[in-house]
Structure formats: C-alpha cells, structure tokens
Image (cartoon, rainbow, N blue to C red):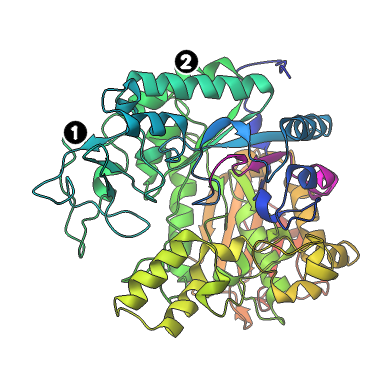
Amino acid sequence: MQKTYISRQSQWWKDAVVYQIYPRSFLDTNGDGIGDLNGITLRLDYVQALGANVIWLCPVYASPNDDNGYDISDYRAIHPDFGTRADFERLLGEAHRRGIRIVMDLVVNHTSDEHAWFTAARADRNSPYRDYYIWRDGRNGTPPNNWGSWFGGSAWEYDEASGQYYLHIFSKKQPDLNWENPAVRGEVFDLMRWWLDQGVDGFRMDVISLISKPEGLPDGPPDGEFGDLSPLCLNGPRVHEYLREMNAQVLSRYDNMTVGETPNVTPAEALRYAGFDRGELNMVFSFDHTSLSDGPLGKWSGQKTDLGALKAVLANWQLALHQRGWNCLFWSNHDQPRAVSKFGDDRPAFRARSAKMLATCLYLMQGTPYIFQGEELGMTNAPFETIADCRDIESVNAYHRLVDGGSVSGEQMMRYIRQAGRDNARTPMQWTPGAQAGFTAGTPWIGVNPNYRQINAEAEQADSDSVLCYYRALLRFRRNNPVIRDGDFVMFYPESDSIFAYSRQFDGETLCVFCNFTDAEAPLPYTPPRIGQIVLRNYSEDAPLCSLRPYEAVVYYAEESGEC
C-alpha cells in the first residue's frame, strides 16, 4: 500500500491526539487469550469517537516474546499471535479511511537473540554480521566491564561457543546493535523506508537515546555488584549524528511523525533531539515527572509523587520548549502504572473525579497528548497477589533479585509491584461487565482487573458523567484551539501544596485551568478576579470559585486577556 502525501513538511503531529495501543491486551477476536490486529480494527470507531487521530501501535513484529515483543526477530513480519500481513493492511486501510494515522514502535537499540543477524553473528566470528553487535573479550574470566543490565545482573552474556561476551542493556535475549557499523544503520534505515512505503505514518523510537555507546566501553559508577551504565550510554557521543543521518536519509523524505523515548533527558538535551531547527525528531518523551516517586531502589518504592515537584517539572518543560520544541503530554504508557493510581486517587469515591482532573490538568498544556488504552476509562492498577500473577520480565527479575537478596520481603515487593510494576498497564482492556471484561472468549494471557464489572467502556458510554464522556468533551474542546496549541504558559500559586493552576495566553485570549490534587476542599490563595465563561468542569453542580472541591477541575476563559 503506497502512501500519497500532500506535503513532506507538514506539522500535523502538533494537532495530533495519540491513543497508545498495547495489542496483546486490547481485544482478542479468535479466543486464544491474546489481543490481535483484528480486535484493533473492530474498535477503530471507538478510538475515533474518543477524539484521537493517531494510534501508536506497540510492537506486532515477529518475536519470541522474552520482553513482550520488544525483542524482535523479524522487523518485516507480523507475529502470528496478532494475525497476518493481510490483517495489518486491513487495519491500516480502515484507520486511514477514518482519518486515523498509525505510528509503529521502532525498536532498534537491540534485536532478539533469535534474529537472523544475531544467529549468524553467534555462529561464526568471521561473519559480517558479527560486527552488527557488540562483542568483547572478558577480563580475567569476568565480563568486559562492570555494566549492569537494566533488567538485573550483568549487561554482558558469555557465549561459550564463540568465546566472547555480547552486550545487552536489557534482557540477555536482547543483544544491543552496534550503531558504529554503517551497515547496521543502513539496515535500520532500509526497514524504516519499507514500513513508511507500506503506508505507516511514523515511529515511536524505543530507547533511542541509548544507541551510541561510549568509546572504549569504560566502567560505570559503582552501584552494588554491577556499575550503572546510564551516565555512559544515555545521550552517547554520536547519537545526534546518527539521528541527523536518519532524518536526512529517511524521515525528511516522508510526511511522518517521530517521537523518541529518551530516559533521563533534560529540557536542554531534549532540544538537541527535537528542537525545531535540529533536523532529528519531532518530539521526545521526558520521564522527569514519572520518576518523582523513585526511592533508594529506583521505581520500587512506596513513595507518592509530591505535587510541588510535579508542578515544577511540568512547568519547566512547558517554558523551556515553548517556541523551540514540542512537548509530549502523558501520564502513563505500557511501562508505567495506571495514571489514576499513581498521580490521582483510585479509591471508588474519588477515582472518576481524579481521572478527569488529571486529564484536564495535562492535556490543556502545549504539546501532543498521549492517552494509554483504558486511561480514558479511569482504569486502575491491578491487585496482584503473588509474583505468579505477573508476566513482566522486569518485575519478575526484580522480585527475585531483591527478595532473594534480602533487600525487601516478598510482601513488601508485591506492594511495590502493585504500585509501580509494568503489568499494571498490561491487564486487558475493560470493554464490558461480562466474562473477562469482554476482552476474550478464552483465557487471557494475564489476569483481568477484578474491578472490570464497575469500570468498563460499555457502562461509561451509557453514562454522560463518566470518565470516557469527559475525555471526549475535553478532546473536542482542545481540537483546533489556538490558545491550547500555541499559547504561553503561566503558572499560578506555585507554593500551593494542593492546587495546580495555570493560564494559556494567545492572541488576546486567556484560558485558565484550576485543578485540586487532593481529597479535601482547597481554598484558593486569592479569588480569581476575571472569571468569564466556564468551558469545562468535572463537577455537574456549580459552586463559587473561591475554593476547589476534592479533585475538582475548572477551566474558563478570563474576561480580560492576561488575567485569571
């Protein structure tokens, strides 16, 4: 399916609303317990009615599924779990017919160890594919350096048959590609062209800031048994050179959208990746706000996000990128816990209200909204009881490393997993109050959250006061709204420990956003002087704007420009 473009220089991604789909958990149509491409096609009208016009599709490529599809064995093949090539082409065509674009996950920091390149590299040290990966001799019977894998253990795996170690920043079944090799870059650029020529509309680039490794592969800072490779591998010495080459050879020749996953990036560094004048990417994901609850064990922490810190981070990104770059607006994704459980309040009395408030607060800022499947329903974290309930390699490895090593008890670790584990986002989409939440007629690959009887799309479509209906209204309001797309950002009440308030100002209009992040009434430090038309409110009953009710969100236009 060849795509026809009007312009290769358009910036349609500035007006995009992205709906992220984790195919394995979205909708199963053949009863095998695994979501599939035909399930996505069946729900395109649902995505369109929500107000999204882009789908970010998590990997559907051939994979042994060591890391649920982020270990790719064939970049041009569809995994049979998800369907066939014809199913993908039908999905793409039906999406385009509805004005919905498809952005694919591009996972090219590493491949699967079952990819043909790696099997050839492993089989013969003289193979040209050997240099597609990063191989080194050991040091006196130990790995080449002290780098620790982000999934636990050493970042090096010894291959006895060939007598060397290969690098894997993630699982040992995810060997890192050697981007120093021009042949590797050529292969990646070729597969990108291939997908764009099929008709896809761009790429979300997995851990793209890791592709350039430091010269000499030096030891990382000491961090327990293994060193921390983050300061060395993130934003490596040639990463911008590689991305400019990618842009020149591929991206600039198509009308497409690109977003990079860039852990630990600062606003200044983000502008190097995605500044309007850089010729690299359109935007990048920052995780400054999602990591505010990290503790001594990283994400495995019982800490809650501090509102003051959250406000400072989000305001910093809004101000730093304004007119110079473009923000990604997201609370959650397939690697994060559910938004309402992490940033809001998932208790039944407050769940819906706080889910609406969170959407209001974030999606009226400048940038492209990214909505993870089920977020628009206010889906919550899951009540995993034992590690046997989990499927995520990161959580399982961390459980055994920390519990077996005596750092935490099994009970404490399960509390951490229920709060921060990636499987929270991967439980099946809750469509109906029927068996298995309407996700499958079979046995789901991971358990359905038991609260699906109360929280599901069928019920919310019929309830005008639901989270889903509020999302639809919010996204209709922001669509083609110049003050939201282009306006300045001004924060109010920066010292408040309960209220997040700001204005957006553009071309004589001032839009005012007030959000209460607590379960108690929050008096405003001062009464807004110029309250005009209220355009959004997550309470059906009006009340004077001298305080905000629990998790209340209020949006209005000021009567006079510049004053809320």
Residue 116 position, x and y percent, is: 46, 30
Which amino acid type corresponds to the residue marked 1 in the rendered image?
Glu
Q: Nearer the viewer, residue 289 or 484?
A: 289
Q: Is residue 30 left or right of residue 184?
A: right
Q: Which mark is residue 157?
A: none
Task: Say if the magenta span includes residue 58.
Answer: yes
Which amino acid type corresponds to the residue marked 2 in the rendered image?
Gln
> Over which residues does the magenta segment extend?
41-64
Eye-nearest disc, 1 or 2:
1
Q: Residue furthest front?
A: 161
Q: Residues within 10 Å of mark 2 (few under 14, many from 20)?
A: some
Quadrant of the rendered image containing residue 125: top left
Q: Nearer the viewer, residue 358 or 429?
A: 429
Q: Quadrant of the C terminus?
A: bottom right
Is 512 above or below relative to 140? below
Quadrant of the rendered image containing residue 541: bottom right
Q: Residue at x 21, y 56 (%)?
A: 227
Q: Is residue 41 left or right of residue 561?
A: right
Q: Is residue 71 left or right of residue 181?
A: right
Label 1's element? loop
Q: Residue at x 15, y 48 (%)?
A: 219
Q: Which mark is residue 215?
A: 1
Quadrant of the rendered image containing residue 296: bottom left
Label 2's element? helix
